[in-house]
Image: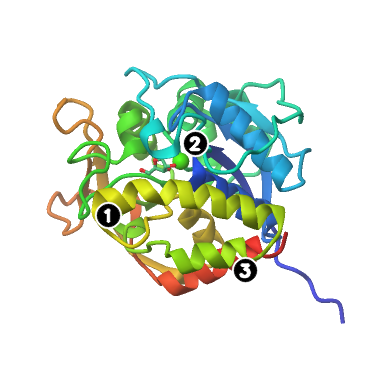
Amino acid sequence: MTTTLPARRKIILDTDPGQDDAIAILVALVSPELEVLGITTVAGNVPLPLTLSNTRKLCELADQPTTPVFEGCARPMVRELVTAEHVHGKTGLDGPDLPEPTMAVQPEHAVDFIIDTLLGAEDGEITLCPVGPLTNVAMAMVKEPTIVPKIREIVLMGGAYWEGGNITPTAEFNIYVDPHAAHVVFTSGVPIVAHSLDVTHRALMTKEWIAAVRNLGTPVGVASAEMLTFYERFDEEKYGTNGGPLHDPNVIAYLLDPSIYDGKDCFVEVETGSEKTMGQTSVDWWGVTKNAPNCRWIREVDTDRFYALLLERLGRY
Ligand code: RIB
Ligand code: CA
């Protein structure tokens, strides 16, 4: 009897590494359930040249130098770029000393790669997984609106409601950097699953977990531990917690095992008018607007299962 393996889920990972992005990339690339069609890079945590270089460094660390990597948008659609070196360090990947990358950058622009890949696929075949500002995804929708019905789902890291903001009192960084792009995405009609600070702040890394990652003893394990030791200091000091949130890998863990999470279908809209609350994600959790939901807003996570999954996957290198 032949056993048929479930079809691999085709994804495009859009990223601005960033140490938390790095873990998302490493876990995605080693998980057989996922077919990473390409990794598109965007300006966010650090400027685009660095997010592009960091992505290539991580693909080489994963020993997957043929991963298609694409250069994306260097700035938000309307606003000036805001970066987060204060969190991620000057390089955006402070911690380990990874060698300068030599792998290829694909010649196609990231926005065109997203468009061409979706137009060449069946409807509902491809999932977009943005874990940085939504500039590339929104620009693809604006440039070629016919891609919208082709997208199976957008599973993103971004937003904040119950938790409050991390870059302003009301806004989470990814949405704040490009609120207009977020508005395009959240009004597109594409099914969205949002992993906001409401869920990522409920699953904090511990020093014991980082030690377990380091004890994998592999280049991936040691480099990951060095990244996360650097990265966690900011949130620990800011929130006075033992450990910090590991935002972006929640997107990949959700794809691998959605039962780790729970949430609610809500109507979500993005503030683009008020400077004071720019980038705020207004989540109609109680349905008071009577507007149809446009997003599954994730709020619950089984922290132990989340970190056990990440460790198991990092251990596959
Ligand atoms: O607010 C957290 C998000 O902003 C994460 O994606 C992190 O990598 C930064 O991009
Ligand atoms: Ca990110």
> Ligand 1 closer than 8 Å to the CB at disc 1?
no
- The residue lying at 71 percent from left, 64 percent from top is 316
Upstream in the sequence, badge 1 or badge 2? Answer: 2
Upstream in the sequence, badge 1 or badge 3? Answer: 1
- What's the CA distance linking mark 3 and mark 2? 35 Å
Label 1 with label 2: CB-CB less than 8 Å: no
Residue bearing the label numbered 2:
148
Mark number displayed over residue 312: 3
Query: Mark 1 or mark 2: which is in front?
Result: 1
> Is residue 52 in sight in this rendering?
yes
Tell me the SS state at disc 3. Answer: helix
Tell me the SS state at disc 1. Answer: strand
- What's the CA distance linking mark 1 and mark 3? 32 Å
Tell me the SS state at disc 2. Answer: helix
At which x and y percent is residue 136? 49, 28
At which x and y percent is residue 32? 71, 60
At which x and y percent is residue 218? 71, 58
Query: Mark 3 or mark 2: which is in front?
Result: 3
Residue bearing the label numbered 1:
266
Neighbours of disc 3 within 10 Å: few (<14), some (14-19), many (20+): few
Amino acid type indicated by mark 3: Glu
**In this rendering, is residue 177 above or below 192?**
above
Neighbours of disc 1 within 10 Å: few (<14), some (14-19), many (20+): many
